[in-house]
Amino acid sequence: MKKIATIILLMSVGFSCSKEDRLTEFAISGDSELRVNNDTNDKCLIYFDNNYIGTMRTNTNRTWKVPSGIHVFKAMTDEYADFVQTDTFPKNGYRTIRLYIKSQTGEIKSIEF
């Protein structure tokens, strides 16, 4: 009976881990900046060219040094559809992305400034 209880406990621990628990941040650097404002009501997993670069809690801002050029930005949450955008990151400049939830559809949206 002890063996069954141990197996059930291990299975429940394995299934309770979030996506974030299994990710390792990709070390990114470059001559441009990605500035993200997470104005959603959920934490967001942030990807740059399909590499996980970090997690943002709700209502936080974060900046990453990234390479200039055309790149793909993605934000993922547990509750909403992924937000994906291809953008040009200027050399010695920055791109700011504000994430928010569009109330009618529940989708993650973005405003750039």
Image (tube, rainbow, N blue to C red):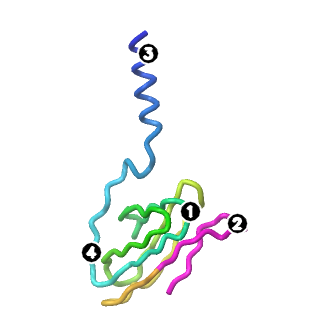
Spatial separation of the CA atoms under disc 4 and disc 1? 28 Å
The residue that mark 1 highlights is 41
Labels 4 and 3: the sequence-earlier one: 3
Q: Is residue 107 magenta?
A: yes
Spatial separation of the CA atoms under disc 1 and disc 3? 39 Å
The residue that mark 3 highlights is 4
Mark 1 surroundings within 10 Å by alpha-carbon count, few (fewer than 14), some (14 through 19), many (20 or more): few
Residue 19 versus residue 105 in the image, above or below? above
Residue 100 versus residue 67 in the image, above or below? above
Question: Where residue 40 sits: x, y (%)?
Answer: 55, 66
Report the amino acid beneath label 1: Asn
Mark 2 surroundings within 10 Å by alpha-carbon count, few (fewer than 14), some (14 through 19), many (20 or more): few
3 and 2 marks in contact (CB < 8 Å)? no
Residue 52 versus residue 66 in the image, above or below? above
> Which range of residues does the magenta coloring cover?
97-113
Labels 4 and 2: the sequence-earlier one: 4
Question: Where residue 102 sits: x, y (%)?
Answer: 65, 70
Give residue 105's mark.
2
In the picture, measured across the screen, residue 31 lies left or right of residue 6, that is left
Labels 4 and 1: the sequence-earlier one: 4
1 and 3 marks in contact (CB < 8 Å)? no
Q: Is residue 79 magenta?
A: no
Labels 1 and 3: the sequence-earlier one: 3
The residue that mark 4 highlights is 29
